[in-house]
Structure formats: structure tokens, C-alpha cells
Image: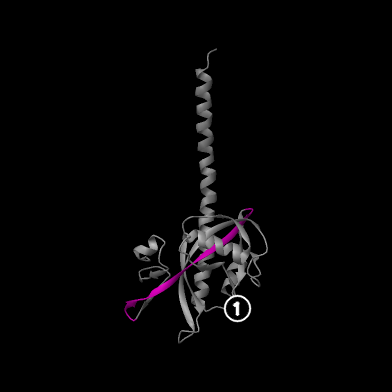
């Protein structure tokens, strides 16, 4: 389980306490929990028949693929901040889910630190893209990938543990979206049946 501070649960402070107990974010270091900064990501997708495509962008350095992501903002909810990143980095418009579906760990270069790398906890939000335009940020090169190609692109050039984190994001997104696809067809017959019964009652009540 990942334990969040009360302030994070309310979407206020951009820091998080990660504890080790069966989740992919294992962040105990020498017996003490680490405070990690928080970012948000828009996992942009579109439906393609029975499958999905994912929209990835280049990192700032241009050497890796990633999801549109960035810092939180005081006046925005976390989902709104992720939606802003999708627009700025990928030029994507669409519908974002209000709650995150996954948390993952990713590093980012930081010259102020001794090892030059800082780790972030990232909240991932599903974002269904309706249309795109050229992004505001240059050299992001937003590109659509199939599920398998997205998993491969995200892993390329990364350490295995961080590559695994990003592959898991794709896997969890596909699981979530596939579950939604299965639920909707099961719901529709029940709705049709209720409408049909209501119509019969109305017709039966009409005077002959």
C-alpha cells in the first residue's frame, strides 16, 4: 500500500511519503521513509477497434519517450494539472478522468543533487484524446504508439527498474480500459430491458 499524507489526499502539497508494503513504489532507504516530490501525468489514449493507441512525447532532453507530465499547481486539481500538461506537451484535447488510476516512480536530472538525479512519484490520469493540435512546447514530437510499441518506446534508454514502472503504467491503463469495455455491453441490455418494460406499462395504462 502507498500511504499518502493528508495534504496529498486533499490535493494540496506536492510531496508524498512512500512506504514499503507490496506496491511497486519501494522507497524505504536505510530504514527511514523518504519524502518524494509529486508530479502528474496524462496517459493519453485513443480507441482503435478492440485495442488502444497511446500518445507519447519526447523528454526535455529529447532522448527518451514519456507521458505528458509535470508539476502540480495550487489553483488546479491534480487531474486539471495533468490535462494542462497534455495540452502543452502533446497538443491534446479530450476528456480526463478526475481520479488517478496508478502511481509510479520516475527519475529526473537535477544538477543540485550529488548524483544528479531526483526521483518523483507520479500520479497517472487516463486522458481520452478527441483531437490534437501542434503542442505549445517545441521538440516534444507527440507520436501515437500501439500498446506493444508504447511499452517498448517507454523502456528504451532507461534503467530496467524505471522501464518496468512505465511498462506497468501501460499495462494498468489497458486493464482499466478493457474492463470498462466489458462493463458497458453488460449494462446496455439491462437498460434496454427496463425501457421496454416501462413502455409496456405505459401502453397497458392507455385507455382503449
Q: Is 121 positioned to the left or the right of 189 in the image?
A: left
The answer to which quarter of the image holds residue 60 is: bottom right
Q: Residue 159: say if magenta.
A: no
The percent position of residue 201, horizontal first and vertical second, equals: 50, 23
Q: Secondary structure at mark 1?
A: loop
Task: Give the quadrant of the N terminus.
Answer: bottom left
Residue 147 seen in render: no
Tell me which residue sits at (40%, 66%) in the image. Answer: 13
Residue 139, above or below 90: below
Q: Is 195 positioned to the left or the right of 149 in the image?
A: left
Q: Please, which residue is most extreme toward the left here?
A: 31
Tell me which residue sits at (49%, 59%) in the image. Answer: 79
The percent position of residue 55, horizontal first and vertical second, equals: 61, 63
Q: Which residues are magenta?
A: 30-49
Give the dominant element type of the magenta stretch: helix, strand or loop: strand
Residue 38 seen in render: yes
Amino acid at each position: 500500500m502507498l500511504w499518502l499524507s493528508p495534504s496529498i489526499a486533499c490535493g494540496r502539497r506536492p510531496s508524498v511519503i512512500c512506504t514499503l508494503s507490496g506496491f511497486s513504489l519501494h522507497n524505504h532507504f536505510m530504514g527511514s521513509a523518504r519524502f518524494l516530490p509529486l508530479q502528474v501525468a496524462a496517459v493519453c489514449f485513443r480507441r482503435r477497434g478492440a485495442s488502444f493507441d497511446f500518445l507519447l512525447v519526447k523528454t526535455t532532453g529529447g532522448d527518451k519517450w514519456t507521458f505528458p507530465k509535470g508539476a502540480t499547481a495550487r489553483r488546479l486539481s491534480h487531474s486539471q494539472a495533468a490535462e494542462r500538461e497534455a495540452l502543452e506537451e502533446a497538443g491534446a484535447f479530450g476528456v480526463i478522468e478526475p481520479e488517478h488510476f496508478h502511481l509510479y516512480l520516475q527519475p529526473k536530472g537535477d544538477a543540485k543533487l550529488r548524483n544528479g538525479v531526483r526521483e518523483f512519484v507520479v500520479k497517472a490520469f487516463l486522458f481520452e484524446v478527441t483531437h490534437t493540435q501542434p503542442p505549445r512546447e517545441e521538440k516534444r514530437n507527440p507520436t501515437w504508439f500501439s500498446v506493444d510499441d508504447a511499452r517498448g518506446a517507454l523502456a528504451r534508454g532507461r534503467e530496467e527498474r524505471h522501464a518496468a514502472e512505465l511498462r506497468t503504467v501501460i499495462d494498468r491503463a489497458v486493464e482499466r480500459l478493457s474492463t470498462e469495455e466489458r462493463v458497458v455491453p453488460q449494462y446496455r441490455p439491462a437498460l434496454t430491458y427496463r425501457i421496454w418494460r416501462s413502455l409496456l406499462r405505459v401502453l397497458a395504462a392507455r385507455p382503449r
